Amino acid sequence: MHTVQIRAVSLNAGQTTEILIDDRLELRKKNISSTTLIITSSRKITVQATSLKLNSVQTALVIPTNKLGKEYLIPPVPQIPGTTDQVSLDVTERRPFTLFIVSAQQGTKVTIEGVSTREVRLQPQQVVQVLVQEADQLRAVKADQPVAVLFGHACAIRHNCTCGLLQITLSPTKDQRLRFLIPPFLAESEALLLISSKEATTIKDFDPDSPLVETSGTAILYRPGLLLALIPETNFASCYVISRIQGMQNFAVIVVHTNFIDGVRIGNLPLENPAWQQLGRTEFTSTEVSLQLDKNVIWHTSHKMAVYFYGKYGTALFGNPAPTISRTADFRGCLLDPEVVHIGEVAAGWRESVKYCRDNGLQLVSLSDAHNVTHIYKEMIQVNNGSVQEAWIGMRRSSQTGEWYWLNNDPVNATNWEEGEPGAVNDGQCAIVSLESGQEVGWSDEDCCKAVRPVCYRRPVLFPLG
């Protein structure tokens, strides 16, 4: 196996880095090759591959091995004058479209289905290229172990006899009918839709009045120089991150339900004067945003959306679905790990409740953040479901000063004491929250030895926006 040594890189949350790969990793005309690049990480990361050669640019998301599939549909080949009508097996630039199939961690048997079935056996991290010739009518790639599948051409004609790399990473097949929405910003001219299902494949012109495709397979947008996998509505998410490519025009194209356009954010800010365009007769709208920052976190405060990375380099086009950070919306930002609100099962004193929460990787809840407290109240009421009337929170008096303090050392600013509370220093040393259904949530002081169930909490983990 041909290995390429790359130094280890340490990144903090939200940081990006660039790794340059030399041409020793080019597959060239080999049928099967063991020349692969393996990227591993101790934490979750996103990887975007960018190919720049002369005036040709292509970008793609690298799918992690745990997201690979065992079955892929082969898209129909777009008819490109000067490319698909001048096929030669001897000249790289005039060869047919090609499939690149990469095995993951295990030896793999791959079956390529068409007029005649072909089988290939791959060792771990091997790659095979398969020519997609019209007579073979290739329909699907099936494997007994997860594989990655790429589809493209080494030098597809764009305009005026210029050609460039044209490539896309295919998505695994799903056994369900999917809806794909096509934003007009991505389909400005000469756009075709390459639609695949297990029953048939179709190529059709993009119709701005019908920007919706429904199929039990995949949908790919083709424009000269660009193949772009469309995001099915089931894969819409709430947070994406895009790293800008220097020296090129970089854009984000956003698709969101018309009723939720106000919740879109880039970093900490709402969109500035977005030009929303309704997607035909659907309930969705889209806009294009020019990206000026090196890292752009695009998220929604309450809803899911689709985001594409799209760009231009001279006359060359490039793009891919933006990397997803989180599918779960949160009004506070880009959610990595959700918050936890848990009502303890055992009624005990305040000190015992502190230990109970810590033993479960949590802490007695602090209600110190005025921006967040209403949300946590709603979560407590929902989790409680009327079963508990009162619960410990992470506040008590100092035995030295008599002043109230939060267990997590947050400052005591806004408070929500019930009328007449808190009492005198000797009335109660620890704070309880009322959880009675239909009652306004309020606090009172109680003897710390009273047997009460705790509200345990863990803050959400958010992706850095800047």
Image (cartoon, grey):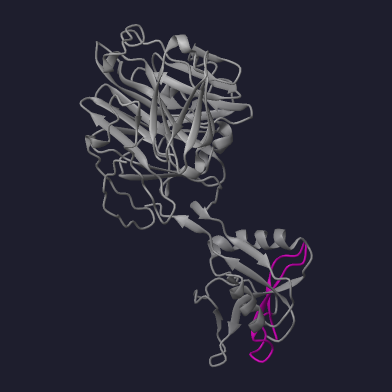
Q: Which residues are magenta?
A: 421-447
Say if residue 55 shows up in the picture. yes
In this picture, residue 464 sits left or right of residue 115: left
User: Looking at the image, which residue is at 38% across and 53% down?
Assistant: 14
Q: Quadrant of residue 393?
A: bottom right
Q: Is residue 204 left or right of residue 244?
A: right
- Image quadrant holding the N terminus, namely top left
Which residue corresponds to the image point at 72% horizontal and 80% vertical from the top-left?
348
In the image, residue 131 above or below residue 364: above
Q: Position of residue 108 (x, y in %)?
A: 48, 36
Query: Can you give x and y, in whole percent of width and height, for residue 51 in the image?
Result: 28, 32
Q: Is residue 443 magenta?
A: yes
Q: Closer to the camera, 33 or 98?
A: 33
Residue 355 coordinates in the image, percent (x, y)? 62, 79
In the image, residue 390 lies at what x, y percent?
74, 72
Residue 147 is left or right of residue 397, and the answer is left
Side of 162 relative to 128 (left or right)? left
Q: Is residue 333 magenta?
A: no
Residue at image position (61%, 24%) is: 216
